[in-house]
Amino acid sequence: MKKKNLARFAAIAAAVSLVLSGSSTAVQATDSQIDGAEQIEDAGAQEEENSRKIQPMTIEEAAEYLAKAADDYNPSVTKEELLKGYEGTENQNINRIQALVMISRAFGILPEPKGNNARISDAGAGYSDIPKDAKSEVENLLRGGVLTSTEDGKLNPEEEMGSTEIEHIVRRIYALFGNNLKDDFYNTVNKDNLDNKEIPSGETDAGGTYDLSKKVQDQVNEIIKGIAEGSGYEEGSMEQKIKTFYQSAADFETRNKLGAEPIRKYLDAIDAAGNVEELSDSQVLSAEEIASGGMFGFVRMTDFRDPKKSVATVMSPIQPLLQKEELESKSGKDYDALMELYATLLKLGGETQEEAERHLEEYLKFLNAYYENVPEPEDYLDTEKMNKIVSPEELKQMMPHVDVEAVIRGNDGKLPEEINIMSPAEFEGYCRLLEGGEYLPGIKTAVKLNLLSAQYLNLSDDFRQAYNKYNEATIGQAEDTSTPEEIACALVENSLGEYIDRLYVEKHFSPEAKQNVEEMIEGFIEVYKERIQKLDWMGEETKKNAIEKLESMNFLIGYPDEWEDTLSDLKLTDNFFQNQVEISKITLAKMEEERKDGQNNRGEKIAMPLTMVNAYYDQFSNTMCFPAAILQAPNYDVNASLEENLGGIGTVIAHEITHAFDNNGARYDKDGKERQWWTDEDYAKFEELCRKAEAFYDGWESAPGIEISGKNTLGENIADIGGVACALEVLKKSENPDYDKFFQAYARSWEKSTTRERSEALAYADEHSSSNLRVNRVLSNFQEFYDTYGISEGDGMYVPADERINIW
């Protein structure tokens, strides 16, 4: 079981920019949909990618490049030696087998991959058509883990190999050796940990902030266990509620005997529904009684027209977890794992194998039709495409067989005057599928899976184990060996997080640290103003507006000045399921109260667990939030040097400031309202710089053969580069700055051991670049980095000055 508090976090994930990628796949069934946006390359982008891969390189050019690339690893290698056997063909384009032989010659015998290099390599790589006279060279590269599989299992030795693919293999070799700062700064600085660190039970990552998360989790568990083992607590106190809840959560004997019985009534109601009206009634029933279920999602969200207000918002209840290609072909690792998970859930819910198989076929039929209206990735940033205001009557007309009023009144208490439809094309397509009865069996299965997924942690442990198996198959999660006590602690933190936050801060976070970070932020704002004033591509009018936005920023640091007590009326018993229901009802009621009559408290409090090692910027309120957990070593230490703190929390702070001016944040003004506050000329220049930044990252690898999209990661990449630029500016103002210490602290902060499966999932779905790129691609933009390490043309970290990114 994952130990992060993502169920609490999920409610606020929309429309915020996080500094870290989805750090865990914890108690949230849909965490693989990071921020809900599917990252699917379009055909045009694929054509461009293919053209880069086959950019021809002559045999002589390859020999010259490889001799220089390998000179620190095989000092005796020369261009002439690499060209032996190719005399007379030097001007021909190099083919695949020639390139691989030359690469192997250049670097010599490769070391066997260890630790992270071994985990992220393509262990199944191999080819059926390796020429005999090149077998030893190709096998050397395969043993080193620097080659990847092909679809047909063939090398196709006579095909041309482009310069991009050759450079990819060379960079994989740099990472494998990890002993030269000039070629791969990230892997060299972090080599010992990357080679030797093990991924903990139930996790997908380790190192850097992930180790800090583990430390925080251990601290939280210690608090919870201490309370659970204590006695004499006053009735209604935080401690009494924590102990009672813990005991009910840890009673797996009772929970396992019950299985899915706590939701049997609602599963049976779904099965019995003979039409949409009856299915709707079943969902109204479960929503009213256990705060779970619905024919559509309903929540009050920030009004896209006025961020100071909220608007009643509806959305489709369907969460597509597959790529369209996987769904159409009914194949692929993720498809197989998801179908196995869903079949297991349905059987644990009481269905036979035959029933589960039949219902999943109906579900897939419905899902194929549903996908016809799922937005394209770029549509998620288009406010007009993603929102549509309608009246309650118009919504009723769209869903004539659904008790719309009952659903809304059950959530909001009263019928609002207007309703916003999120992703209207998708929602309207869903509504059309509700009509006629053709897709009713599939929709019933979808609704049942929603209920089982929402409640899986509240039922027998078989449900949790099913999700563990799914996570192991899709994202390489390490086998979960959590004890019942650890599982119970995670459930306490997830459901009683308000209390855990308070107890954690009281024990592990100081007012001094909060004050120091607040002062650091003030300094960064001033430096950022100076940097904006110096921009040569931005005009005075836009600079004035940008500085106004900086001056209007709101910062929430560490913990609130006053603690809330949402759960003051909570009464707990030894019935774990009912305890979860009561907490859900109270939490939902609190959310409704805070946003009734169009009110919006966005930006008034940190909207993520204070025990989460992360930070975020919210463009709708122009607010940056830094929970207590991230404000400690190694990110921040009152006893650390200026360079170390700047390389850690300093770059995080400046990263979040930059989000106000990335390709997404730049569309919102100082009040969080989407409007054009730039001059047309300046915005055109900014878009040109963004395109350059997109190309700077596009196609670079997070792991061998796994490329990231410069388009999908653009905002985070802009923030990464801007964050380091601002932190460096602060460092320059100090006396005798130690740049080496700063750069190494920055590289260590992003250390991450992971798995190939996790890398694949994040390359598809995450808006952040991988850790190696968040260090190597970022630092290669700064002259101070080149001067510190004597990096020059021919080194792996070198980027020509005119290709470097300098936006903020």
Image (cartoon, rainbow, N blue to C red):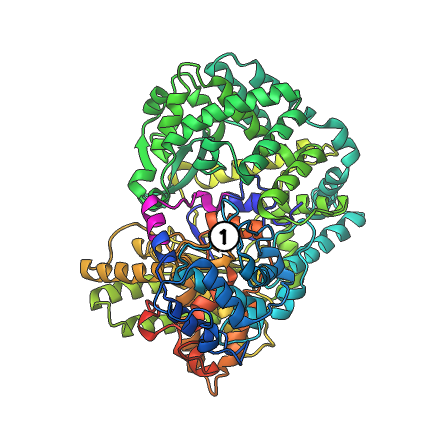
Q: Quadrant of the C terminus?
A: bottom left
Residue situated in front as seen by the camera: 89 or 105:
89
Rendered residue at 41%/71% (across/down): 87
Determine whether, in the image, residue 615 is placed left or right of residue 433.
Answer: right
Q: Position of residue 551 (x, y in %)?
A: 35, 65
Q: Quadrant of the N terminus?
A: top right
Residue situated in front as seen by the camera: 147 or 762:
147
**Of helix, strand and loop, which one carries label 1?**
loop
Rendered residue at 81%/48% (across/down): 231
Rendered residue at 41%/31% (across/down): 371
Q: Which residues are magenta?
A: 33-49
In the rendered image, which quarter is residue 403 located in? top left
Q: Position of residue 787 (x, y in %)?
A: 43, 83
Kindly give the residue lying farthest to the bottom in the view shown.
736
Q: Amino acid at mark 1?
A: Leu
Disc 1 packing (10 Å; few <14; some 14–19; many ≥20) = many
Question: Would you place residue 15 above or below residue 728 in this image?
Answer: above
Q: Which residue is mark 1?
A: 155
Residue situated in front as seen by the camera: 208 or 218:
208
